[in-house]
Image (cartoon, rainbow, N blue to C red):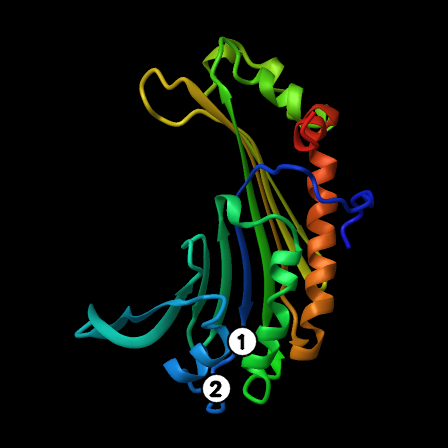
């Protein structure tokens, strides 16, 4: 897809994930009428906690050459949560989002096991998907020492780390994130990685962040959803394995 080296997929004994979001965008359709009954009939067994949320927006018009702001109501969304509250589905007339917090996500099977329910929910209502995306945010906390940038060399592939040693007083650097964006005919890859010290006085904890988002920005059929997810997930895994080094892999393996 973007040329990252293929890595043999395995489920590590632990992970660094703080947030995983699988999102589907589609056009508004008269066939797709949101209502509590249809949503619960498909998802209530796995997501028993249910809330209907009223959306708000702002419309801007020009009146007498001055902008006029008008509050809009509607665009309701439905939010469903798992029993432990760590897995969330949000649905509105244009978006379906499935997200996992902290320890809720163990492997890609967490999403794959729900694809049949998603297909059942959309079947006969939405056939064409405009956008499919997967975002994974990894955060590795470490004890903030005299040279927090050193943790990047310990955990990440040194060839992808910027030449931070060329800067003076590297022990004073508290934010060192790099951003890389790819695009081809069908996909976007948005990648951020590096080190961050939260802006709190005398903060003793630092973070290594690996934020990977892969988006299919061209039209897919609903029947292709599983195959597209597999392609996206495989490439996200390849990117992650390219960024980390053997030290990080040893930690993930529980060594």
Q: For the residues marked 2 and 1, what is the alpha-carbon distance in whole angstroms?
A: 10 Å
The picture places residue 144, in percent across and down from the top left corner, at 47, 16
Residue at image point 57% right, 48% down: 136
Q: Which of marks 2 and 1 is nearer the N terminus?
A: 1
The mark closer to the camera, 2 or 1, is: 2
Q: Which residue lies furthest to the left in this view?
A: 64
Residue at image point 60% right, 67% down: 114
Identify residue for label 1.
Answer: 26
**What quarter of the picture does the C terminus occupy?**
top right
**What quarter of the picture does the N terminus occupy?**
bottom right
Name which quarter of the figure residue 165 lies in. top right
Identify residue for label 2.
Answer: 32
- Nearer to me, 213 or 172: 213
Residue at image point 51% right, 62% down: 98
- The answer to whether residue 181 is seen in the rendering is yes
> Helix or strand or loop: what does disc 1 sit on?
loop
Name which quarter of the figure residue 117 lies in. bottom right
- Nearer to me, 171 or 51: 51
Residue 247, placed above or below residue 178: above
Q: Is residue 74 left or right of residue 101?
A: left
Name which quarter of the figure residue 76 lies in. bottom left
Residue at image point 59% right, 80% down: 120
> Helix or strand or loop: what does disc 2 sit on?
loop
- Nearer to me, 210 or 166: 210
Residue 53, placed above or below residue 238: below
**Callouts 2 and 1 close, C-beta under 8 Å:** yes
The picture places residue 244, in percent across and down from the top left corner, at 69, 31
- Nearer to me, 23 or 160: 23
The picture places residue 220, in percent across and down from the top left corner, at 67, 75
- The answer to whether residue 66 is seen in the rendering is no
């Amino acid at each position: 897809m973007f040329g990252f080296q293929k890595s043999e997929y395995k489920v590590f004994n632990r992970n660094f994930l703080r947030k995983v979001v699988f999102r589907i965008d589609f056009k508004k359709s008269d066939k797709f009428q949101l209502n509590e009954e249809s949503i619960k009939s498909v998802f209530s067994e796995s997501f028993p906690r249910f809330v209907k949320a009223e959306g708000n927006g702002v419309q801007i018009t020009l009146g007498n050459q001055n902008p006029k702001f008008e509050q809009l109501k509607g665009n309701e969304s439905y939010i469903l949560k798992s029993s432990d509250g760590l897995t969330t589905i949000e649905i509105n007339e244009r978006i379906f989002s499935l997200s996992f917090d902290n320890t809720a996500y163990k492997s890609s099977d967490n999403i794959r096991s729900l694809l049949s329910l998603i297909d059942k929910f959309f079947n006969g209502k939405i056939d064409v998907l405009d956008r499919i995306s997967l975002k994974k945010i990894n955060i590795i906390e470490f004890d903030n020492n005299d040279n927090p940038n050193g943790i990047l060399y310990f955990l990440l592939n040194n060839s992808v780390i910027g030449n931070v040693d060329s800067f003076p007083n590297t022990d004073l650097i508290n934010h060192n994130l790099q951003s890389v964006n790819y695009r081809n005919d069908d996909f976007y890859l948005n990648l951020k990685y590096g080190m961050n010290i939260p802006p709190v006085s005398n903060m003793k904890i630092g973070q290594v962040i690996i934020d990977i988002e892969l988006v299919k920005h061209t039209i897919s059929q609903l029947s292709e959803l599983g195959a597209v997810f597999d392609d996206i997930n495989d490439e996200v895994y390849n990117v992650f394995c390219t960024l980390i080094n053997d030290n990080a892999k040893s930690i993930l393996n529980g060594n």
